[in-house]
Image: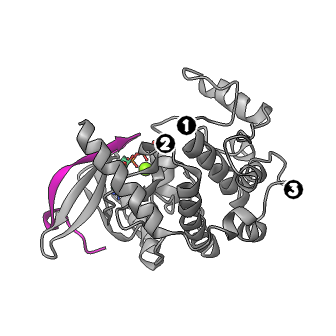
């Protein structure tokens, strides 16, 4: 990590989440656009060093479906994480995405996940806002929880359960790739319908009620009159509460929904992203 604060010029805020802001910046010497995520964290120098060293592994992750990592640094009580900038932003802003476009996007999402899983890295926070798109039709995953220490440091100040978490993870069991397959299922369900697959879920639920809902309920299926049978089937297989029934990584890659979209039609995604961005520009 040779990146420094002085290397970057701030352009604008791209968004903010639970804990930090993301800025669009220009890397002064190369003139290239970069995203900078800044999170306030009061940590000892030792823990800071540990986080930066755990994040080094991201330099080894080179996949077109994973956001490029340029470096991270601490400045006073803030960590800054510098990554590739995606001009289309995150998929939460595109909901609902038509099935044919989402099918193409799914190929990239699954490609990125499988790449990281092969490196024994779990994402730990799969959801629409952590999937980014650009106007060339690329689809990339961001915000991998590669630093256990960073995940821990952020989790102590914010509530730990979200609607994308697998039941076994919520119950505190040892979790693995299959928990990510579940999160992928919730994510695809939401991106395609604008809804979550739990019928009794409401806003303003307490963390306990939310946990109870995910653990007790059987997730819904996508409506079969609106989506193709193999897409409905695929999401159903991701959303099996029983780990033995949930789709394995091998079967994920050979499922008809994934197979028929495996070229990831970047042209279709590019057209969709550009069209959506220009419609937004007209509205605002
Ligand atoms: P949470 O904090 O709950 O995980 P989040 O993922 O939306 O939610 P952030 O990760 O802080 O929060 O990101 C905030 C927003 O910034 C995202 O929703 C996305 O729209 C935008 N963003 C993040 N990274 C990039 C990037 N590399 N390029 C372009 N936009 C980005
Ligand atoms: Mg995020």
Mark closer to the observer (2, 3): 2
Outermost residue toward the top? 204
The residue indicated by pointer 3 is 244
The residue indicated by pointer 1 is 194
Is 193 left or right of 170, judged from the image as shown? left
Question: Which quadrant of the rendered structure holds the C terminus?
Answer: top left
Q: Looking at the picture, how far across and down is residue 262, in whole percent?
A: 62, 72
Relative depth, front residue between 174 and 42? 174
Q: Is residue 12 above or below residue 251?
A: above
The residue indicated by pointer 2 is 95
Element type at marker 3? loop
Dot 2 or dot 1: first in sequence order is 2
Dot 2 or dot 3: first in sequence order is 2
Q: Is residue 218 above or below residue 264?
A: above
Asked if marks 2 and 1 touch (Cβ < 8 Å), the reply is yes
Relative depth, front residue between 11 and 44? 11
Disc marking residue 51: none
């Amino acid at each position: 990590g040779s990146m420094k604060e002085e290397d970057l010029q701030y352009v604008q805020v791209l968004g903010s989440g639970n804990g930090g802001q993301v800025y669009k910046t220009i890397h002064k010497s190369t003139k290239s656009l970069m995203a900078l995520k800044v999170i306030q964290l009061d940590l000892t120098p030792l823990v800071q060093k540990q986080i930066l060293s755990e994040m080094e592994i991201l330099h080894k992750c080179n996949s077109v479906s994973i956001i490029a990592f340029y470096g991270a640094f601490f400045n006073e009580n803030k960590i800054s994480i510098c990554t590739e900038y995606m001009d289309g932003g995150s998929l939460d802003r595109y909901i609902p995405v038509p099935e044919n476009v989402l099918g193409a996007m799914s190929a990239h999402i699954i490609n990125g996940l499988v790449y990281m899983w092969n490196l024994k890295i779990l994402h730990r926070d799969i959801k629409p806002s952590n999937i980014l798109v650009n106007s060339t039709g690329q689809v990339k995953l961001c915000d991998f929880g590669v630093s256990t220490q960073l995940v821990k440091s952020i989790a102590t100040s914010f509530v730990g359960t979200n609607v994308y978490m697998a039941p076994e993870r919520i119950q505190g069991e040892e979790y693995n790739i299959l928990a990510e397959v579940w999160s992928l299922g919730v994510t695809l369900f939401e991106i395609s319908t604008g809804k979550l697959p739990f019928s009794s879920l409401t806003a303003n639920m307490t963390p306990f009620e939310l946990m109870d809902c995910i653990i007790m309920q059987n997730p819904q299926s996508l409506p079969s009159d609106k989506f193709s049978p193999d897409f409905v089937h695929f999401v159903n297989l991701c959303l099996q509460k029983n780990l033995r029934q949930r789709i394995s990584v091998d079967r994920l890659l050979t499922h008809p929904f994934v197979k028929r979209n495996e070229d990831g039609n970047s042209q279709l995604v590019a057209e969709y992203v550009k069209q959506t961005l220009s419609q937004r520009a007209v509205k605002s």
